Image (spheres, rainbow, N blue to C red):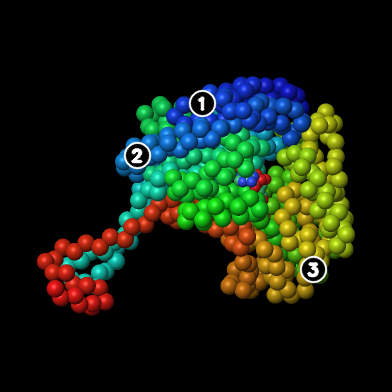
Amino acid sequence: MPENDFDAFRKDTLKNVAIEETNSGIFAGKWYPKAGESKYDSISPVDGKHNATVFLATKEQYEEVVRHSQKAFDEWSKIPAPKRGEIIKTIGDELAKKKKDLGALVTLEAGKTTSEGEGEIQEMIDVAYFAAGLSRQLYGLTMASERPDHRLYEQWQPLGPIAVISAFNFPSSVWSWNAMVAAVCGDTVVWKPSTKASLAAVGVMKVISSVLDREGAPQIFSLVASRGSEGGEWISNDPRLKLVSFTGSTKTGRTIYENVARRIGRAILELGGNNCSIVSDRADMKLALKGVAFGALATAGQRCTSTRRVVVHEKIYNEFLAKLKDIYASVKIGNPRSNGVLVGPLIDDGAISTYEKAIAEAVKEGGKLVIGGKRIQVPGLEKGFYVNPAIIEANPGMEITKQETFGPLLYIFKYRTIEEALEIHNAVPQGLSSAIFTTDMREEEYFLSARGSDCGLANVNTSTAGAEIGGAFGGEKETGAGRESGSDSWKLYMRRQTVTINYGRDLPLAQGVRFDV
Ligand code: NAD
């Protein structure tokens, strides 16, 4: 198939992952009939054409999904964790076989380049294997009791059914960071995908549900495609869902958090970022340029970890900006399947107008647009949603630079001292990812000290974007609460129980309290 024949690519991709013209977006042990009145028409941002339709859930179907998830939990939570891990490993194996097909679906629906689309599925495989290993390491601590003949320890229990609400820009991997880990912990998972990227969720569920069937395991993963304002409301107000892991904008996340807090539920929030890189005069220039360009341009600036601000030492500012502009001028924008293309489309028209408005606002506030910033038409894909990535020379007083604009818009600032660089770096409400490019150990350590980066992720000589699954992923301040994926994030998917056992014949009380009856 010629790489530019996007219609043929669409047809093949949908066929390979068994997506039909119309699809149910509701799975709970079985695919529900396409009954809902509301539906979502998936449009590819690559060429603006229709991919397929997904029927969205009614409230009644949502109720059935949650009931199913509760029932599946009763069965799943009784299976020993290492056995659960073995089943999750087989999911990783199957995803590895389907990596190309599912990656292509992400390209079709979200407009990611082929390598980024497949990278998304690789992340799912990685976290499935990580979770399989984790299933034998859900460790609790044992403490020395202050009372004679007593044992004190903690154990971890599954939470119950939990919910994952995902964003369009990582339509499947973010779900897996939560779902694979939650599953080995013994939870079941209700997934509400983004209405802008529900096809990827349907494709993933088809693969995963068939593995669970083959393994004779309960169908622990359910899907409830629904409008954000409906599904998000149902889930966040539903006390049967013990944890809501939400990924999306800070604005939506705030509403979700308020609802979950009202019912004293548990939430993980992975919200907007406004990530910054500091480039020192002692940086390896080539490496810094590549790291900043990748961070700002990859996924057309639609990663939560995309580099949105770069603070450059005054001594190298002009040289750095000139070289960065050269990269921007030469980078290939267009069909994300074409060889050499590094920047694909934005997700939709709305994203382009937000981008254009932010640029106009930045210029009004005194910023200088030095390159890009316009909508462009890609030959043969005229209805796709493409822009020229922009760089704006900015000053830290500009209010617009404190907001996340979800596209390839980079603000560049000048600094004189490392303290000043960190001040600019930390002066935003978000706190997801950060980076410093330097070969000076003192600067690097300052960046990593308590006075340094205030973000959940800190990178040295590498980009703000592109985290590995092994680390705990998440942010501070308005980026949210909690961590996902690696390290000890699993603890958020379980409830901790502190156990005290008295194996003596007396009842000594803690703190020496006496109660003689
Ligand atoms: P969004 O907030 O528009 O949507 C996120 C999810 O919320 C979707 O499932 C959507 O259907 C649902 N939703 C929409 N409106 C809702 C409402 N009123 N009530 C309840 N739910 C609603 O975000 P998006 O545009 O899909 O994704 C981009 C945003 O996500 C960016 O801000 C990005 O930084 C953030 N993000 C953060 C991370 C992270 O790990 N921190 C990762 C990916 C994306």
Q: Amino acid at mark 3?
A: Gly
Q: Residue at x 51, y 26 (%)?
A: 32
**Residue at image mark 1:** 32
Q: Give x and y (percent) for residue 398.
A: 80, 64
Q: Residue at x 67, y 33 (%)?
A: 109
Q: Could you say which is closer to the camera, residue 418 or residue 356?
A: 356
Label 3 CB sits under 8 Å from any ligand 1 atom: no
| Residue 257 relative to residue 107: left or right | left
Whichever of labels 2 and 1 marks the residue nearer the N terminus, that label is 1
Q: Give x and y (percent) for residue 251.
A: 66, 53
Q: Residue at x 82, y 63 (%)?
A: 394
Q: Are marks 1 and 3 in contact (CB under 8 Å)?
A: no
Q: Is residue 28 above or below residue 355?
A: above
Whichever of labels 3 and 2 marks the residue nearer the N terminus, that label is 2
User: How busy is the neighbourhood of tag 3: few (under 14 within 10 Å), some, or many (20 plus)?
Assistant: few
**Residue at image mark 2:** 74
C-alpha distance separating marks 3 and 2: 55 Å
